Amino acid sequence: MAIHSIRTRHTLALAAAAGVAAAVLSVPSPASAHGVSIMPGSRTNLCYKDLLQNGSTQMPSNPACADAVRQTGTTPLYNWFAVLDSNAGGRGAGYVPDGKLCSAGDRSPYDFSAYNAVRTDWPKTHLTSGATIQLKYSNWAAHPGKFEVYLTKSGWNPNQALAWGDLDHLQTVTDPPQNGGVGTNEGHYYWNLQLPQRSGQHMLFIQWIRSDSQENFFSCSDVVFDGGSGEVTGLAGGEQSAAEVEALGADVENTKADPIHAAGHTEHAAAGEELAASGNEAAGAVPAVVAGLGAVVFAGGAMVFNRSRRTRQHG
């Protein structure tokens, strides 16, 4: 009897453990994704905004954005926040090749190579030399880490491929505050940046270095120093204020954002509409988890009971 009792407890413990494991695995994990600068808007962010204004044709009006779509399709734009390298680990110059800074060295799960194109007709944000701006960086997913902010040097030629040697480091910002919802088009980190003296067209480049993984994100924003205060040109509808551009798509759920299944991204279980629905799914998952746990434990108990009954019958 003692032996049977020990076996019974052991089998029930295993069944309970299996039930707990099944319960844990069945709880939806929070979706994770990424981010780029939204003020000044990055190439992928502003081209996505342009795409939204031309949803019926799925072709941005901006010629540079349109050529990028012709080259790599719209999927990179619906995943505008995913310009990343899972293994960068804070590495920059000497790791990410010159000419590929705007595509994360072509190591992203999406093909952002077209956004390295050397041309002067990308959407542009107009700024004032020496002014202080509030820089905004998408928090499509929130990660701890630091932001390394660069600007091209005085005299930079926008008709040449962007290289690390073209950049001046402006600031390092660690874990800045956030505003707006994670996983939305307008949610963002924010901090102040005093711009140096510049004139003409330049590139603002930001590398976001996570402190909880090796994953890094990369952002290229075309800016013009001409006395502006954040106005954007090159999108459908002509010049728009920074607030108007930020509002574009604010009420649109990006349901075409894809889950990331590339190597090294197994923690990114969902994006887009799955992220927006994760709160509701988590609430609804609890009863299902409990039911699943109960079913497993019940099955384990039934197995033990039947085994015990057979032992008694044949003992």
Image: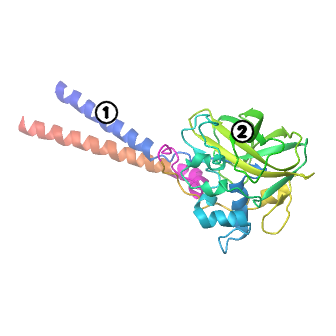
Q: Amino acid at mark 1?
A: Ala
The tag on residue 165 is 2
Please identify the quarter of the rendering in which residue 159 is found: bottom right
Q: Quadrant where the C terminus lies?
A: top left
Closer-to-camera residue (4/61): 61
Q: Residues within 10 Å of mark 1 (few under 14, many from 20)?
A: some
Q: Give the x, y percent position of residue 30.
A: 56, 46
Please identify the quarter of the rendering in which residue 173 is found: top right
The answer to whether residue 74 shows anywhere in this view is no
Please tell me whether residue 267 belongs to the stretch shown in magenta: yes
**In the image: residue 272, left or right of residue 303:** right
Q: Give the x, y percent position of residue 188.
A: 73, 46
The segment highlighted magenta reads 263-284
Q: Residue furthest bottom?
A: 56
Identify whether 11 is placed above or below 230: above
Q: Tell me how the rendering is colored.
A: rainbow
Q: Amino acid at mark 2?
A: Gly
Identify whether 304 is placed above or below 203: above
Q: Residue furthest top?
A: 2
The residue positioned 87% from the left and 39% from the top of the image is 196
Q: Secondary structure at mark 2?
A: helix
The residue positioned 64% from the left and 62% from the top of the image is 68
